[in-house]
Amino acid sequence: TLNLKLLQGDCPYARFQTFQAWPPSSPVRPRDLAQAGLFYEGQEDRVQCFCCGIQLSQWVSGDDPWTEHSKYSRNWCGFTVCVLATPRPVFDRIHLVHPGFSAGIHPLNPARRNMGFSKRILDHRSLRAL
């Protein structure tokens, strides 16, 4: 079946809205989860990525949604790869989990770097082969 949440998940606000019933005792903030590409499934503390479909749960104090998302994605998630092309703080966090990943990101030129394009993200299908 087609998951409408996956289709609409590319909007951070739409993802954030899925956290209306998020457990208040959770150590991870809904805003941080939504920014990391995750939406709430409505069960316990389980979230899912709108792009790669990975499901994460059992959050503990100190967990960073970006780090956990990157760490447990079997294939590189297209969303995290695209985001990594520009925001330096996010890149630094995920680089700690996968130190060799930065070697594959080469901005094409300064103008495109600001737009978030890189050689690594031009062909999403090639990411599945990794």
Image (spheres, grey):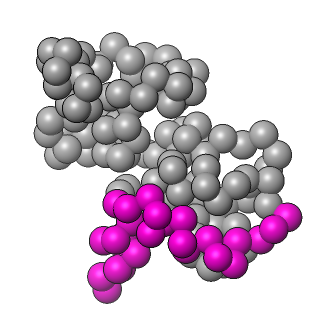
Please state, as top left, top right, bottom left or bottom right, where the C terminus lies in the image: top left
Q: Residue at x 35, y 27 (%)?
A: 86
- Examine the rendered structure and indicate whether residue 6 appears above or below residue 58: below
**Total label count?**
0
Q: Position of residue 90 (x, y in %)?
A: 50, 30
Q: Is 99 located above or below residue 80 in the figure?
A: above
Give the vertical position of 107 relative to 52 (above or below): above
Which quadrant, please, contains the N terminus?
Answer: bottom left
Give residue 32's position: percent from left, percent from top: 61, 50
**Toward which corner of the image does residue 113 lie, by quadrant?**
top left
Q: Which residue is outermost to the right?
A: 25
Instruction: Say left or right for 10 vs 115.
Output: right
**Residue 36 included in the magenta stretch of the image:** no
Looking at the image, residue 30 lies above or below residue 95: below
Nearer to us in this view, 69 or 26? 26
- Residue 124 shows up from this direction: yes
Range covered by the magenta-colored residues: 1-25
Q: In which quarter of the image is residue 85?
A: top left
Residue plotted at (44% across, 69% down): 14
- Percent x, y for residue 75? 37, 44
Q: Which residue is drawn at 78% across and 40% down?
A: 62
Q: Does the stretch in magenta take in 19?
A: yes
Q: In this view, does 72 lie to the left or right of 116?
A: right
